[in-house]
Amino acid sequence: MKRARRLSPFHLAARWILPWMSLATVPAWAESAAGSGQLAAGYLAQLLGGLVMVILVILVLAWFIRRVPGAQGQGRSIIQVLAVRGIGARERLLLVQVGEEQVLIGVSPAGMSALHRLDKSVEVTPDEQWTGDFASILNRIKSGGSQS
């Protein structure tokens, strides 16, 4: 079975919008009067400008959703991130629970690596627990706590 290729938003926009743009220009050059042609050209420019703005808003929101942790609606699973601690500008420590086992993972720009497997499980208080949802991150920032 062949795997479907995922297209980027730019490719999708080019595939779906360009044919419609060519159809939208038909009434502008079909008009015989010069005055009505200018009105149609102005209307078309306004219409295309609005369309471009809507597409840009959609692309920015898609980018934002990919960057915000937990905004993709991850359900309950056997892999849970219990705690996250920032130790540098781009380095973090994650305490991850997989089933009954807890693993300390180091994350850096070079990649991820398992640092330690805990023999005894650590109980994480709700203040330290990382839920990954936007509301808890926003509340933590508003209350003056750390965001990582």
Image (cartoon, rainbow, N blue to C red):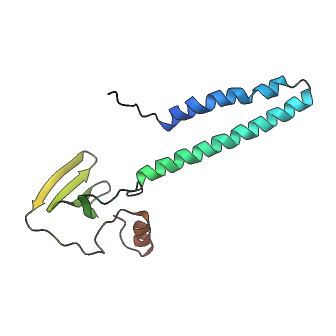
Residue at left 21%, top 54%?
A: 106
The quarter of the rendered structure image containing the C terminus is bottom left
- Identify the residue shown where x is 70% and y is 40%: 49
1 sits to left or right of 78: right
Q: Position of residue 47 (x, y in %)?
A: 73, 40
Q: Is residue 23 placed above or below 102 in the rendered structure?
A: above
Location of the N terminus by quadrant is top left
Furthest residue in direction front, as rendered: 1
Q: Position of residue 68 (x, y in %)?
A: 42, 56
Is residue 140 shown above or below 76?
A: below
Residue found 34% across the figure and 58% down from its top: 75
Task: Please say if 64 is above or below 13.
Answer: below
| Quadrant hosting residue 70 | bottom left
Total labels drawn:
0
Q: Is residue 83 above or below residue 112?
A: below
- State the residue at coordinates (52%, 50%): 61
Query: Residue 73's image quarter?
Result: bottom left
Residue 12, how many percent across, how many down?
A: 53, 34
In the figure, is residue 25 to the left or right of 133?
A: right
Image coordinates for residue 118, horizontal then vertical, percent: 11, 63
In the visual, does 127 lie left or right of 117?
A: right
